[in-house]
Amino acid sequence: MESQIKVTGWTYAGLFVVTLATLMNEILLTRIFSVTMWYHFAFVAISVALFGMTLGALRVYLSPDYFTEERTPIHLAYSSLLFAVSVVVSFLVHANLRFVFEASFSSFLSIALTYSLFTMPFFFSGICVCLALTRFPKAISRLYAADLTGAALGCVLLIYALRVTDGPTAVFIVAGMAALGSLFFSMRIKEESRIKLIAFAACLGFLAFALVNTFLVWQQKGLIHLKYAKGYKEAPTLYMKWNSFSRVTVRGNPDKPEQPFGWGLSPVCPCQTPVRQLTVRIDESAATVMTHFDGDLSKLDYLRYDITNLVHYIRPGSRVLVVGSGAGRDVLSALVFHQKKVVGVEMNGAILNATNKRFGDFSGHLDRLPQVRFVNDEARSYITRQKQHFDIIQISLVDTWAATAAGALVLSENSLYTTNAWKIFLQRLTPRGVLSVSRWYSRTVPYSMYRLTMLANAALRGIGVQYPRNHIIIVRNMLRVNPGNTPDGLGTMLVSREPFTTGDMDKIEAVANRMKFQVVLSPRYALDSTFASLASSSDFPSSLAALPVDLSPPTDNKPFFFYWLRLGDVFNPSLWHDPGTGSNVNAVFVLASLLIIVTILTILCIVVPLILRKPLQMGSRPWPILAYFAAIGLGFMLIEISQMERLMIFLGHPVYGLSVVLFALLLSSGLGSFLTANIQGDHLRDKGLKRLSALLLALVLFGLMTPALVSLFAASTTPVRILVAVSILFPLGFLMGMAFPLGFKQASLTSPALTPWLWGVNGATSVYASVLAIVIALAHGISASFWSGFACYALALVCFLWAAGRKQLGSAAGSGESSRAKVPAGATQL
């Protein structure tokens, strides 16, 4: 007897909208977490989403008497409605809680509370999606396609939503879309008409509030605000703008002069003349200063005393390229030194808009000066495709000093600090050109500057320089007072295409003596033997072996510049309180905490159902199909996360890596799933074998060819690079999208009662893989994470053949009645 419930257009529409809202919420959380907590918690949003949906699937599996077949439409409508409501509730609670970040038990509890709080919306979404996918097994291919296509569109929709409104308002847009899904599901319900009215009212209410609040946001009068950011209470702002990159805020009194600010200002700086300036913050951690400029450069003479501008003393009359122009401080510095041309490259359009438009009268409309040009682009890509050469490329504190705490996890990393990038920068310099890089300097253990030295050595050797030390100068300015947890000082490294001349060194030493700076390294002097060794050595392993941490030069395969702990160093107590590694320990503590949490939860998601459900309900020997779903869950996420890591270097920003990879893989996977609709019965094993074998072949080709393609198109514009990324991911996602419906159809033949649990196992292992992928990449590189995913799919192929080779219920006695007799109560039959 066939099931009484049928798949209708409303079911497809509801699933499409709910998964769209789910992915919007997942990516939105990466933005919110980046503001309220730290950058690396952007990555946590992925595991939160997967874990919540896994719990939802297990709830369906463990309660067959409650989630009965005939009440499926009602449960679909109510679970999606609860998803909508909990999205708003979880955000409002989080917005008013102070997050604690440190290597302590209270921090562990804070992480656990946040994890649990944001699991709730995804729990209800998981119930909804699990019911939609498991209650209609004959339509699984098309339903899974609707699921993935909706999720893919959600990736794109959120980017545009954040262009017109802010993060808190986007939460209500997500809730409105989820409520719309509930309304679609409720259209087929006749016996409980009130759910239609509730869903309609919720949808209308959430979206209407989002519309009204958007108009208020444009006037800087939004009704919903975050109470805390980075553990501190939010201060009033003059301007706030969210986008897919960040949240930009401007604070201060534009009419009140104050003492000039600068981390690198000399102690002999004549800074008595006050200036008007505003503070610009990006996600409340990276900060820059917007300086009032009325055309009189003499008022900004204090910029000559900033160590970040040291390069201008030895290369006057230069063409300057500023990486990360921010609010224009480095551009103003170049003008103070009367450089002939300045190009400021800034990836974040919201910062450029604030500097040159919203506060243009305050900042002096620098973009209108004939010798100045601002470019809204990713700096590495922009420099790569330039035909012209520059005399100076300046990178001054492009990353916040707090990024060292965030840098242990992938979404905080930057494509600027790899040997691949520095070789490009050096090749775009004129023969006498200089790359100037300023970073925070620790007084006792300057690991960041040590690694920068190693990076310069490797990059110089990469362009054919035999004696790199002759091309490197490092000068530091240590703070006399070190308030709170601020850095000890600032170091500036100068790297030249040609060896520094005697005149260059004499000039640098004279300026350093006058400014009370200290030369750390030059061709004729080294503050300590470590700097001399790192700048000169051609035997990197030997030079690094004596150090207590790993300072090997970062590459595009291991782009973790801010991470220098070896995995085994986490258990070294001497490094826990080391000022040079403390931030790394904190970040690894978070990663280790998450790995422990998801490991326990993954095991529980597999073991608890075995305990709570009777063995007879599990069917006979479910292990092959169980291993299959676990393997594809691990494989998909290992490949997805590894490609996010790789492509965020290629695309230039974590948000691009996240959004492009998710969009391409989900959309192509949806298409792949759709095209498995006609694979049934006797053809399942053979066609499944062919498609999974094709997937393994595609993974091999992808793994071998992608590095070359990324290198080939590195100089292309951002739209072209996005198109290339989508093009290389599409065939891969197309074949990966077939794995789930093929396994689901096999499970429906051999163990139909297990399908909700198998969907949960797939989600649980995906959660685990989302953390495991980072651990593998940190230890062995992005490629190792990718090939681990390949190994999982190879295991999945073996498990599929194992499961398909067993006697199928559907053909056990040549009768549908025989197979249905073996299906336990509560299982779906169609």
Image (tube, helix red, strand yellow):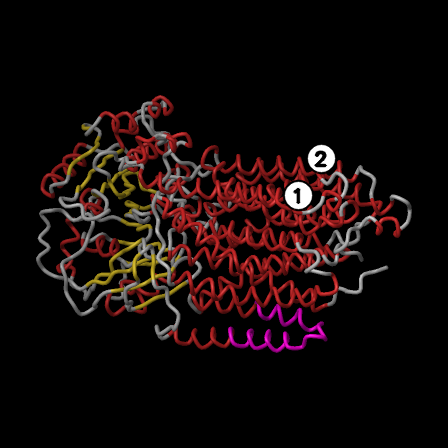
Picture quadrant of residue 452: top left
Of the 4 image quadrants, the one containing the C terminus is bottom right
Answer whether residue 504 is visible to the viewer in this image.
Answer: yes
Picture quadrant of residue 529: top left
Task: Write down the region rendered in magenta.
Answer: 178-206
Closest to the observer: 639 or 174?
174
Would you name the residue on which mark 2 appears?
Answer: 798
Say left or right for 525 vs 629: left
Q: Is 393 a magenta residue?
A: no
Q: Position of residue 487 (x, y in %)?
A: 23, 44
Which badge, 1 or 2, is on the more N-terminal residue?
1
Q: Residues within 10 Å of mark 2 (few under 14, many from 20)?
A: some
Q: Position of residue 745 (x, y in %)?
A: 76, 49
Answer whether residue 497 is visible to the viewer in this image.
Answer: no
Predominant SS along the magenta part: helix
Q: Which mark is residue 329?
A: none
Which residue occupies 71% across, 58% down? 65
Which residue occupies 64% across, 77% down? 194
Which residue occupies 38% across, 61% down? 349
Query: Which is in the foreground here, disc 1 or disc 2?
Result: 1
Closest to the observer: 429 or 78?
78
Q: Position of residue 406 (x, y in %)?
A: 37, 46
Would you name the residue on which mark 1 appears?
Answer: 610
- Secondary element under disc 1, as helix, strand or loop, is helix
Three-letter code, disc 2 = Val
Confirm or deny contact between disc 1 and disc 2 (CB under 8 A): no
Say left or right for 273 vs 475: left
Three-letter code, disc 1 = Leu
Say left or right for 387 vs 121: left
- Secondary element under disc 2, as helix, strand or loop, is helix
The mark total stands at 2
154, above or below 781, in the image:
below
